[in-house]
Image (cartoon, coloured by chain):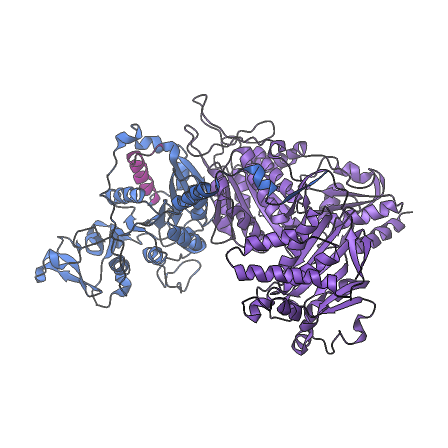
Amino acid sequence: MKIKAPVKRPAKPSSGQGQENGGLTSKNFVSGQEVRWCPGCGDYSILKQMQTVLPQIGVDKKDIVFISGIGCSSRFPYYLDTYGMHSIHGRAPAIASGLKATRPELSVWIVTGDGDGLSIGGNHMAHALRRNFDVNIMLFNNEIYGLTKGQYSPTSKMDTITKSTPLGSLDHPFNPAAFAMGADGTFIARSMDRDPKHLQAMLKRSHEHKGTSFLEIYQNCNIFNDGAFFDFSEKDRKMHNALFVEHGNPMVFGMENELGVRLDGTKPEVVKLSDGYALDDLWIHDEYDAIKSNILIRMESLNTTDQDVPRPFGVLFSAQRSNYEVLLEQQIDFAIGQKGKGDLDALIAGNETWVIE
Amino acid sequence: MNNVIEEKQNVVVKFAGDSGDGMQLVGTQFTNNTAAVGHDLGTFPDFPAEIRAPQGTLPGVSGFQIHFGSTSVYTPGDSCDVLVAMNAAALKSNLQNVQKGGILILNTSGFDTRNLKLSGYETNPLNEGELTGYLVYKIDITKLTREALLDVEMGVRDKDRSKNMFVLGFIYWLYNRKPENTIQFIEQKFKSKPEVKEANIKALKAGYNYGDITEAFSSRFKVKPAKMAPGTYRGITGNPALALGLIAAAQKSGLQLFYGTYPITPASDVLHELARHKNFGIKTFQAEDEIAAVCSAVGAAFGGNLGVTGTSGPGLALKAEAMGLAVMLELPLVILNVQRAGPSTGLPTKTEQSDLLQAYYGRNGECPMPIIASSTPSSCFDAAFQAVKIAIEHMTPVIVLSDGYIANGAEPWKFPKSADLGEINTKKVTSKENEEKFMPYLRDENLVRQWAVPGTEGFEHRIGGLEKDDITGNVSYDPDNHQKMVKIREAKIEKIADFIPEQNVDSGKEKGKVLVLGWGSTFGAIKSAVVDLLSEGYEVAHAHVTYIKPFPKNLGKLMSQFDKVLIPEINNGQLVRLIRDRYLIDAVPYNKIKGTPITKLELKEKILEVYSEIG
Ligand code: SF4
């Protein structure tokens, strides 16, 4: 059987300039509430990039809503001067679903973490992804429970020693992007707190995607899991371990871009360009190719060579599929077209009435 | 032959058969016919929990009971005057509810060796003396139906499906009815299947004619139309009435109705009904679970819509945390709970009133929420409508309690005109009048905050589940503020007592010896018991509480006018606890927890017992 990846590609997205938003700047999005994360927490940078991007996306402040669950990340809405709700643990996608279903014109952002979004709220996450409401999910992954003071999370590596797992954690972790892929998400991207430019670009792409965008953001919890992602974020190690993919470009990385990823059939392998490989020989990233994206997202776990493979960042997959809220409105229009606009008195009377004199 | 026509005041008929025998259809058709000839009525369908329970067995029996008469009917009836049993299992599970001297109409082909064995009869009750004292009519319905359909082109199995229509035709004859409405129904339903249409109509007529031509039946019955208040009526069951009440309230408030729910017995029909009326702009959302269902409704409410969720007991437990969020956010939200017997999965298809304390207390923290209870199928309309009104005008989640008995029972309903329904005014803000910062938790004289919905310029604000600072709504850990906010939230709900009707006495005087105080689906049983006792000269009265939180302001005073207050409930004593706690009176509980309604007779006995204890 031939599996066909979606071929319809959106026009190249515009980057959206500040002017479109009535000249707002990032300052207009600061709520004034005292920010209460630990000093040095990666959340600060994410907040800053969000406040930078919001004036650029061309949406009125009044039409933007942030909905979060519970956890360090979920304090996010308090610090943005938009509409916002800090809800209950794990349920932000469900709340956002009801909001978007009834108010399709709003720009709805869901802020969650690895515990909130993949543990207690894993069910809602999966269903939001498959329904494909046009909302943006930002999952701050710090591979730890911060707010409850340092237990392992569903993305913690096996054998993680924490207060709740003094002998090491036993469960195999989630790969959030693979989770999203498994739930038939239509936009899957990864970025990190310590790369402001890249994060801003990914936030914009999330906004531009028409459907549920799932953006995993590696976020350093300097209190309970310091350095979890330093392999990918710190200058000396980043070039070697992080692969920044872009649609249509070959996958190269390394200090001097001297390394590349090649596909041998369905097997990814890391090659040295100095070994005679041209850029054309490398894997050219196609974010609309579901099969290749699956391989890309799972590159690490699929790796059977003794070489390390890099961790991909960027838009890992994107596809177009109808949005739930649009279909819902269409059904209503259809019903009105068929039966006419509802008449309350006729409805209350029903089909069979009788009169008592 | 000339039959004698006997006149009756009230009759209870039960149709019982295998779940595949089409007894529910027979019941609803007979109900419509009964309503159309002007009787008052009440019905009670009871069906197996399993979708396809094994054929011929006791758990597979499906029944439909209808009580109709020329006087007021308040319940589906304690015991039957007529039982139609399509097989041995149907007889076995219903015989104890047939009055001595009652009529049994038995389908003889349902009493073969296999059926007898499956139903646990050791000997055939048709042949033994077991049925003496009843008027027994043995009819081979299967055979007669097949004969009537001899010239219809279809297989025997398909023909046998029409035997319920034979039964219905025969009952129409027995009660002197015209079968026209059913013929119309069949013509409509099987428009595209001419042979099925023909078979059903033929079977119906054959059943009717069978009564006419056979000599076995000496009498037919006639029941005069009831003296009901003049007006236009329709038949209604509880769940559709809830749905209609919501739709009406949405229109009256000018809000879009969003119903987020997860399928659960016996509440799913509310979803089914609402989903049929998308042309009213209603959005229904079948969520992934009960929690997502209520959360989606909270999201819709935050967006300025009428957010509603519906469920039954186990689902209410799952929704508790999000309901608490709605209390904290002070957003309008309606939660329908069509109760069933618990705990846990309990008896999903059986009725119980055992979620009252869950509705009242079942959330973390101090989490007050208004509770409205429907008491009959048609009262579900008002309950839903009033719940929406309170939710929107007082910015609070509201729970509506119904139950399986009300949900599936039918009664005639003198329905309202939309113009006569009250208005519902939202607390929405539209535009800013000054540059001052919006204070989300600033309240009016009724302690109600404003509703600022996304998309409204200048009102951008954040709310959440953390404790709120009074007025500003900012997160606050201040101890004094927390105490203040807990008190304000409670006071806000208590204030609603100023806006709900005072408690009335349904039957009897406002002073006397025993007040029977009920809520929910015990209405019919209490009313008929009290009406009986009043006519026998006892100083009793019946009051039925619709508003359980807050209680009507005069309730305490009303109860104090009686020597004793008796509270019958289909649970282990829940309203009685709330009443004792609130009013410090020695209310007497009467509890039945069998998954079935309280009957008039057992209640009368209890009332008399309490009565006799008063000096
Ligand atoms: S505990 Fe960790 S994640 Fe939470 S605020 Fe502190 S540094 Fe950030």
User: Which x, y percent locates residue B99?
Assistant: 80, 62
The answer to whether residue A186 shows anywhere in this view is yes
Q: Is A103 situated above or below B74?
A: above
Closest to the observer, B605 or B36: B36
Residue under the point 40% across and 44% down: A330
**In the visual, does B250 lie left or right of A134?**
right
Where residue A45 sits, quadrant-wise, is: top left
User: Which x, y percent locates residue B418?
Assistant: 60, 34
Q: What are the residue bounds of the magenta stretch?
A: A43-60
Q: Is A206 situated above or below B176?
A: above
User: Which x, y percent locates residue A214?
Assistant: 34, 49
Residue under the point 51% across and 59% down: B193
Closest to the observer, B520 or A207: B520
Q: Chain A's shade in the image? A: blue
Residue under the point 67% across and 78% down: B113
The answer to whether residue B315 shows anywhere in this view is no
User: Which x, y percent locates residue A3?
Assistant: 28, 61
Q: Main secondary structure of the magenta part?
A: helix
Q: Is residue A143 magenta?
A: no
Q: Residue furthest right?
A: B615
The N terminus of chain B - image quarter: bottom right
Where residue A265 sits, quadrant-wise, is: bottom left
Colour purple belongs to chain: B
Where residue B206 sits, quadrant-wise, is: bottom right
Badge count: 0
**In the visual, does B400 lie left or right of B441?**
right
Closest to the observer, B212 or B100: B212
